[in-house]
Amino acid sequence: MIKRTLYFGNPAYLKTKDNQLIIELVSKGEQHTAVIEDLGVVILDHPQITITQAVIAKLLLHNVALITCDHSHHPAGLLLNLEGHTLQSQRFRHQLEATVPLKKQLWQQTVSAKVFNQYCLLQLQLVEGKLLLDYSKSVKSGDPDNIEAKAASFYWKNIFGSKNGFYRDRLGPPPNSLLNYGYAILRALVARCLVGSGLLPTVGIFHKNQYNAYCLADDVMEPYRPFVDRLVLRMHSDTEPAHILTPDLKRALLEIPVLDVSLDGSISPLAVAVQKTTASLAKCFDGSIRKILYPVFPDGDIK
């Protein structure tokens, strides 16, 4: 079952009764309900939202990722469940005891998958990207040649080639704001699935920033980024650049969990694919398998 993503951008009062989320929309005088166990991500994006402790506790009990936004309407915080799996302590131990060679091999697979998906997206945009295909096949254990950065330089120069003056930067020109918001949703989704697979989102296989609480999420989400990029390409317009993240644009980005991807030979929603990816990573840590399952664009998309 695909978990729902709820976005709140207006004043609201959130409470709970009988495992239902009771939503009171203050400005409209309306009341709605949602089954908490059907939720995957909840985004709070207004200073006049009131949420009870009971709601927070039930959201975390059902492993719902709770995102709060700042005054600029960008995600600023992420709250996750601490007990996401029955074998959590065992999986923590396997993850923490992972050898350096294993981590390097996992990062090699991750970079290769990311660069290949970047190549596929350029193909969909009718941009010659064979260089990225070659890069994806040449990644070595641990990526000592920094293929990821080389590929990124080529990719960002070409993917928005028709958008004059574009460069990828968090504070850069449109559609950077769309990319930032989309990646934040993706990051929350990946972090939630990591917890559900009994893994620590903080301990990465490559990212190691001591101030980053979601290093592993940042690792695992890399091959999924091009799917967000493709959605942003569909949304962005030269004539009406997205300087401001409007409710309609945010609503469109909430489609990320249900985007079609191909994983292990079958088409599935992105949210389901992420669950399979994190489950496969847990098996890599315990030695059951040697390869992470990462998605590609559906065959029908790539001509």
Image (cartoon, helix red, strand yellow):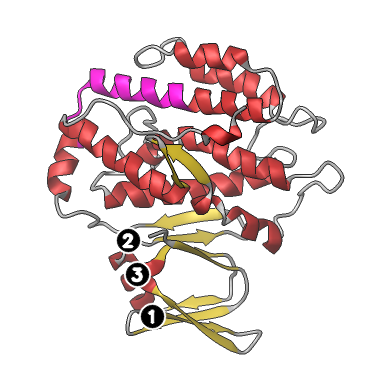
User: What crowding class fits label 3: few (fewer than 14 Cα within 10 Å), some (14-19), or many (20 or more)?
Assistant: some
Magenta span dominant secondary structure = helix
- First in sequence: mark 1 vs mark 3: 1
| Tag 3–tag 2 contact (CB < 8 Å) | no
User: What crowding class fits label 2: few (fewer than 14 Cα within 10 Å), some (14-19), or many (20 or more)?
Assistant: many
* Label 1 sits on residue: 20
Numbered circle sitting on residue 299: none
Question: Looking at the rendering, in which quadrant would you find the N terminus?
Answer: bottom left
Q: Which residues are magenta?
A: 95-113
Vertical relation: 20 (above or below) 293: below
Q: How many marks?
A: 3
Vertical relation: 20 (above or below) 200: below
| Tag 1–tag 3 contact (CB < 8 Å) | no
- First in sequence: mark 2 vs mark 1: 1
Element at label 2: loop
Question: Looking at the rendering, in which quadrant would you find the C terminus?
Answer: top right
* Label 3 sits on residue: 37
Residue type at the position of mark 2 = Asn
- First in sequence: mark 3 vs mark 2: 3
Residue at the image position 24 percent from the left and 22 percent from the top:
102
Residue 238 percent location from the top left of the image:
83, 41
User: What crowding class fits label 1: few (fewer than 14 Cα within 10 Å), some (14-19), or many (20 or more)?
Assistant: some
Residue type at the position of mark 3 = Glu
Residue 96 appearing in the image: no
Q: Is residue 298 or residue 238 the one in the foreground? A: 298
Residue 134 percent location from the top left of the image:
53, 11
Residue 101 percent location from the top left of the image:
24, 17
Residue at the image position 49 percent from the left and 37 percent from the top:
224
Query: In 3D space, how far apart are the residues under numbered discs 1 and 3 (Cα atoms)?
Result: 9 Å
Element at label 1: strand
Vertical relation: 47 (above or below) 246: below
* Label 2 sits on residue: 63
